[in-house]
Amino acid sequence: MTLSYAISEDRTNDVVEVSITRYRCSLQTMQQQEKLGGQLYIKITAFEHEDLIQKMKSDRFDPTISLKLEANTAALRARVNNYNLEQVKILVRLICKNILGKKVVLGKIEIDSNSDLWKEIVRTPSVPITRMINFE
């Protein structure tokens, strides 16, 4: 996952960007997905004061245990007010939608003002920070 924060001139149109490159999943996730019988996708949502400000959903994909990086990424770009940075939250979920249309959340990550990653991007604007994440 790569996260970056850019400050605007007026500080009311700052930009937070999140991009996720699919890498690999655990054997347990593959088995769980096979049992559910559907495909996986990543959903990223951004909130400010608990209000939804932006959302995106990746294309569906099959899980893999390969060490090869996928060319496709899931990316979200949200405009935020600098004065509300303490109230911004990014939620990243790995979801399986089975053949009956039922959605099952297999894992999630929440990034907010209390997380180390968030503090780092705010402290170093315009510098993308990349971290390996584990949804389990």
Image: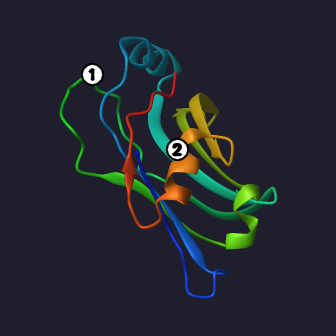
Looking at this view, is 107 or 117 the one in front?
Answer: 117
Observer-side mark, 1 or 2, equals 2
Q: Position of residue 6 (x, y in %)?
A: 49, 71
Q: Position of residue 124 (x, y in %)?
A: 46, 59
In the figure, is residue 70 to the left or right of 101?
left
Q: In the image, which disc is placed on residue 14?
A: none
State which quarter of the image contains the N terminus.
top left
The residue drawn where x is 38% and y is 34% is 132
Determine whether the residue tagged by mark 2 lies in a helix, strand or loop.
helix
Q: Position of residue 33 (x, y in %)?
A: 46, 22
Q: Is residue 54 above or below residue 35?
A: below
Determine whether the residue tagged by mark 1 lies in a helix, strand or loop.
loop
Residue 46 is drawn in which quadrant?
bottom right
Report, in whole angstroms, how far the alpha carbon at label 1 lies from the one at label 2: 26 Å
Q: Look at mark 1 in the image and give the residue it sits on.
A: 65
Looking at this view, is 39 or 54 the one in front?
Answer: 54
User: Furthest residue to the left?
Assistant: 68
Q: Position of residue 86 (x, y in %)?
A: 74, 56
Q: Look at mark 2 in the image and give the residue it sits on.
A: 117
Residue type at the position of mark 1: Ile
Mark 1 is surrounded, within 10 Å at the Cα level, by few (under 14), some (14 to 19) or many (20 or more) other residues, namely few
Residue type at the position of mark 2: Leu
The residue drawn where x is 36% and y is 40% is 61
The residue drawn where x is 38% and y is 57% is 128
